[in-house]
Image (cartoon, helix red, strand yellow):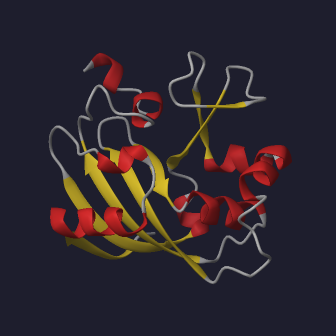
Amino acid sequence: MQKDLRLLTACEWWGRVKVSCRTISGQYWPVSAADVYEYKCKVSEFLPRSTYLVRFTNKRGDQIVSWNHPEATPITISEFSKNVRFVDELLQAWDNGTPIQSAQLLVHYCKSCNRRLVIDGVHRIVHLVAHQNFNVELYVTELAGTKWPQNMPDMSVVCICRKSV
């Protein structure tokens, strides 16, 4: 359940992207019906939503590939976190063993197909899920829209309705 839902301005979104987001998709804005929200929820409440990472697999699901790979297939946080090899590869140089008490995420959300894409906080959310820390509080800043740019990396793989736009 989302708690403390608050509408933000575009300036607040861009400020957060500028400070922490290194993903190319952070530079994109929905074509229509854009809203920015901030809310908090538990990891366990966030996972059941159709939430994906800015990491993709090949069609067989056994190899990580880039968003522009011909076989790029979206993978949910839950599925990614079940693959020990994927988790180890992602967290190898990042995880120093310090427990995570909370996490901030930047998320894109397509209102049309109801899919979310974590564009910042990937390491934190994968660490929490892989270690089954489902009661940790997440602070989510979410940019929502009904259409996304055709040339947008990451969302071009995750968003299933954009292909018909």
Q: Nearer the viewer, residue 113 or 157?
A: 157
Q: Nearer the viewer, residue 153 or 32?
A: 153
Across and down, in percent, residue 79 comes to 70, 43
Identified at 37% across, 69% down, the residue is 19
Across and down, in percent, residue 78 comes to 67, 50
So how many labels did they put on this image? Answer: 0
Q: Is residue 55 above or below residue 60?
A: below
Residue 15 appears anywhere in the view:
yes
Q: Is residue 10 above or below residue 99?
A: above
Q: Is residue 47 above or below residue 146?
A: below
Identified at 39% across, 42% down, the residue is 114
Residue 33 occupies quadrant: top left
Q: Is residue 82 left or right of residue 100?
A: right
Q: Residue furthest right?
A: 84
Residue 92 occupies quadrant: bottom right
Q: Nearer the viewer, residue 26 or 7?
A: 26
Residue 3 occupies quadrant: bottom left
Across and down, in percent, residue 45 comes to 54, 65
Across and down, in percent, residue 150 comes to 28, 25
Task: Pick the quarter of the image with the N terminus.
Answer: bottom left
Identified at 74% across, 21% down, the residue is 60
Identified at 71% across, 65% down, the residue is 94
Q: Is residue 49 above or below residue 98?
A: above
Q: Is residue 148 left or right of residue 33?
A: right
Residue 9 appears anywhere in the view:
no
Task: Pick the quarter of the image with the C terminus.
Answer: top left
